[in-house]
Image: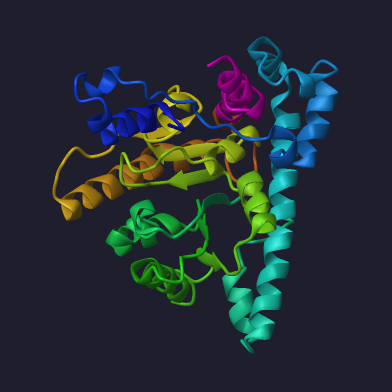
Amino acid sequence: GVSRIHGRVSARLVADQWPEIRPEENPVGFVTNGVHVPTFLHQTWAEFFDRHLPAGWVDRLSDAALWSALERTPDEDFWAASQDVKSRMFESVRGRLSAEFAAKGMSGSQWRQVVRLLDPDRPDVLTIGFARRFATYKRAALLLKDRARLARLLGDAERPVLLLFAGKAHPADEPGKSVLREIKQLMLTPEFAGRIVFLDDYDMRLARWLVAGCDVWLNNPVAPLEASGTSGIKAAINGRLNLSVLDGWWAEGFDGGNGWGIPPAQVQDAERRDALDADAILDTLEEEVVPLYYGAGAGRCSAEWVRRCKRAQMTVIPRFNMRRVVSDYASG
């Protein structure tokens, strides 16, 4: 398996190969995924680490004591690096949308409405990212179940929230393509224009921009169907906070202070399960995420937000890097 939960699920799936023992005792194990940190770490953060961490940090990725030094870095410097990465992401996304709208013959006024919160000079807008395959179990449209509540959350003039979507559906996955179309249509509606943005032609470059630049990385699969997931790891190594259902790697990575973990609803009815999970995520956004991000006032550094972002890097980089993965495979 590629995470602890996935190992347990896999052991049950192949239990008939060892009928004489219980599934949890069969030989199926797990090595939780990680990412190649030098590939997915934004250059701005690499330069920040060069200034504030001991020399040779890139060769000591699994050294938790080294990463604990991030606690002592100045909040203002950390926040400035974070905002620089986000500003660059905004600029890149605006350029991509400009080219897309021009190619489709859409008007300049439509483009300006869609990108009004994507201002590289004012990146102090809470930005939530959801970018991955649009497989139905990943529930890309989960938060759209209560559109009125979502519209109120995103539309607060004092504490604006931007939701960036990107991804592709398999050509044969009609339900996945239907969800994709639904989200794309919302970005031009009056209640969500400029607050929900869907980015076409999802590719590695766009993925790297988003995992590095979005303040919060959203993941809400149907548990326990997420084998591991790695986009959230890429976000965390860039000092971003995961807001995720406790499945896959995040069930191991979440420690209560490095993001937000949503316990999956334990009900059989799919509609009821989705409604409960959506409510839990919206509750967390309304009661914790938004107030924490804007706790120091617009454009200012929220000390508690920065503390959590530092903790995301401190806890995720040492445990979920590819060197640790290879070491686990070699020693297992």
| In magenta segment, residue 308 | yes
Nearer to us in this view, 284 or 202: 202
- Res 294 seen here: no
Farthest-out residue, bottom:
105
Q: Residue 190 location in percent, x, y?
A: 44, 76
Q: Is residue 80 left or right of residue 317?
A: right
What's the colour scheme? rainbow
Name the residue at 20% across, 47% down.
273
Nearer to us in this view, 38 or 9: 9
Q: Is residue 326 left or right of residue 99?
A: left
Q: Residue 274 location in percent, x, y?
A: 25, 51
Q: Examine the image and state in which quarter residue 118 appears.
A: bottom right
Nearer to us in this view, 201 or 32: 32
Task: State the count of labels.
Answer: 0
- Res 70 seen here: yes
* Residue 112 vertical position relative to residue 79 in the rendered view, above or below: below
Name the residue at 25% across, 30% down.
15
* Residue 209 vertical position relative to residue 169 in the rendered view, above or below: above
Nearer to us in this view, 47 or 2: 2
Farthest-out residue, top:
65
Q: Residue 6 location in percent, x, y?
A: 38, 33
* Residue 13 vertical position relative to residue 325 in the rendered view, above or below: below
| In magenta segment, residue 314 | yes
The secondary structure making up most of the magenta span is helix
Magenta span = 307-332
Q: Is residue 120 left or right of residue 9?
A: right
Q: Residue 21 location in percent, x, y?
A: 21, 18
Looking at the rendered image, the quarter that the N terminus falls into is top left
